[in-house]
Amino acid sequence: MSFNTFGHLFRVTTFGESHGVAIGCVVDGCPPRIALTEADIQPYLDKRRPGQSRFTTQRREPDQVKILSGVFIDEATGEQVTTGTPIALVIDNVDQRSKDYSDIKDKYRPGHADYTYDAKYGIRDYRGGGRQSARETATRVAAGAIARKIVPGMTVRGALIQMGKHGIERARWNWDEVERNPFFCPDAEQAKFFEAYLDDIRKRGSSVGAVIEIVAEGVPVGLGAPIYG
């Protein structure tokens, strides 16, 4: 089994590197005749897009998605719909600054996948982390936007609930607040604390972990399996 593919009935294979020409994915298992255009996917990529606050990577990527295959115009309705064949999506990389990474060409960064990639494959793309870069997650977001079209009425939301040892106050949980701060935190008061807290950590040249909570609502009965999915 390829470790670039996940899923069973709905399978997603991602490809591309952080500083390559493009990143993308192939979605297989999408039912036919589901209305789908780039406009259905783009809002989710816009939300994820880097460089939107000082707390994320400052790389500037427009993340414009293109659908290469798997759709066709339904003559009866005039809508672009899925055909049931693999859907290929591509997102061009336009803001690569590979020279910024030349100093780690012969060094392994702590807490990263540099060493493990070298040990496993005997070669690694050090430019921006290559395949193990968080840039790859844009393709998962694009595939997820298609998945949302398949199971209408089901919502999956996420929120940051802890940074370091500091957690939110659940009594103040407000989903609307998630869209109002750069941390996607449901607690407005704690979001303000996180801002000062993270600024201090950055000034000290350090880093900190966090906890994200995912909530799925409206999940159809019988979806998945009891043990291993």
Image (cartoon, helix red, strand yellow):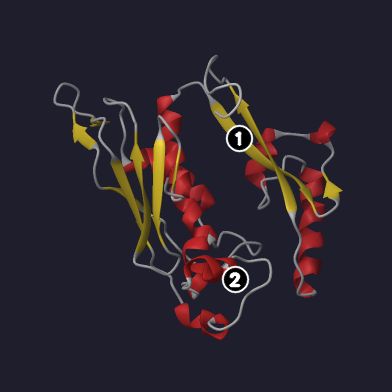
Residue in the foreground of this view, choosing between 44 and 221: 221
Q: Quadrant of the C terminus?
A: top right
Q: Quadrant of the N terminus?
A: top left
> Disc 2 marks which amino acid?
Tyr
Residue 115 - label = 2
Q: Residue at x 38, y 38 (%)?
A: 40
Determine whether, in the image, residue 167 is placed left or right of residue 226: right
Residue in the foreground of this view, choosing between 53 and 225: 225
Crowding around mark 1 (Cα neighbors within 10 Å: few <14, some 14 to 19, many 20+) is: few
Determine whether, in the image, residue 201 is placed left or right of residue 113: right
Residue at the disc numbered 1: 157
Position of residue 123 measured from the top left corner of the image (x, y, whole percent): 46, 73
- Of the numbered discs 2 and 1, the one sitting upstream in the chain is 2
Residue furthest out toward the top: 221
> Disc 1 marks which amino acid?
Arg
Q: CA distance from mark 2 to mark 1?
A: 33 Å
Question: Vertically, is 59 above or below 219?
Answer: below
Q: Residue at x 82, y 34 (%)?
A: 170
Position of residue 96 measured from the top left corner of the image (x, y, whole percent): 43, 72
Crowding around mark 2 (Cα neighbors within 10 Å: few <14, some 14 to 19, many 20+) is: some
Q: Quadrant of residue 189?
A: top right
Residue in the foreground of this view, choosing between 106 and 18: 106
Residue furthest out toward the left: 75
Label 1, secondary structure: give it.
Answer: strand
